[in-house]
Image (cartoon, grey):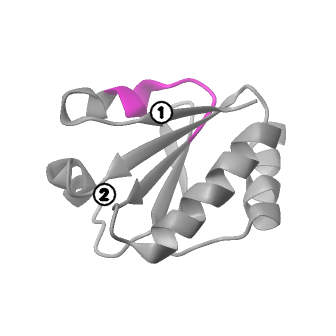
Amino acid sequence: MAKIIDLLPENCEDALVIPGVTVLYFRAEWCGFCKTMSRIIEQVAAEAADEVTFVKCDVEKCPEFAARFEVTSIPRMVIFKDGLEVKRINSSIGKAPLLHELEQLLKG
């Protein structure tokens, strides 16, 4: 099972040094699409390998961190492998396609 971490302003940088595959997920409480995506992430986390970590970042609580990744719309995901950015997903994505993306990253 993958881990899910909620970022706070004081621990944003920690998200960039997590080993394995990390999905940095930018969201906001008021965003309807983000709520749907959060449910999908919880489902994927239940099925994903231990090497995957999901990190939720509320753009209103961590605006400087979101700006650093040029987040202009939400939901948005930035995927890292061993601290290096490998992919961006700039909208909602379904459970099956997200699981497929993660499996491909874990293989390669």
| Residue 58: mark in rendering | none
The residue at 34%/36% (across/down) is 7
How far across and down, in percent of the image, does residue 93 sit?
65, 71
Q: Is residue 21 magenta?
A: yes
In terms of depth relative to the viewer, which is nearer, 97 or 86? 97
Q: Are the residues flagged by discs 2 and 1 in contact, CB closer than 8 Å?
A: no
Q: Is residue 30 left or right of residue 81?
A: left
Q: Is residue 107 magenta?
A: no
* Image quarter (top left, top right, bottom left or bottom right) of the N terminus: top right
Residue 108 at least partly seen: no
In terms of depth relative to the viewer, which is nearer, 17 or 30? 30
Foreground mark, 2 or 1, reads: 1
How far across and down, in percent of the image, does residue 105 sit?
74, 45
Residue 47 at least partly seen: yes
Question: Which amino acid, mark 2?
Answer: Phe
* Element assignment for label 1: strand
Residue linked to disc 1: 5
The residue at 44%/45% (across/down) is 56
Q: Is residue 48 above or below residue 19?
A: below
Residue linked to disc 2: 69
Q: Is residue 77 left or right of residue 69?
A: right
* Element assignment for label 2: loop
* Image quarter (top left, top right, bottom left or bottom right) of the C terminus: top right
In the image, the segment drawn in magenta is: 14-22
The residue at 28%/74% (across/down) is 72
Q: Is residue 84 above or below residue 30?
A: above
Q: Is residue 104 above or below residue 19?
A: below
Question: Which amino acid, mark 1?
Answer: Ile
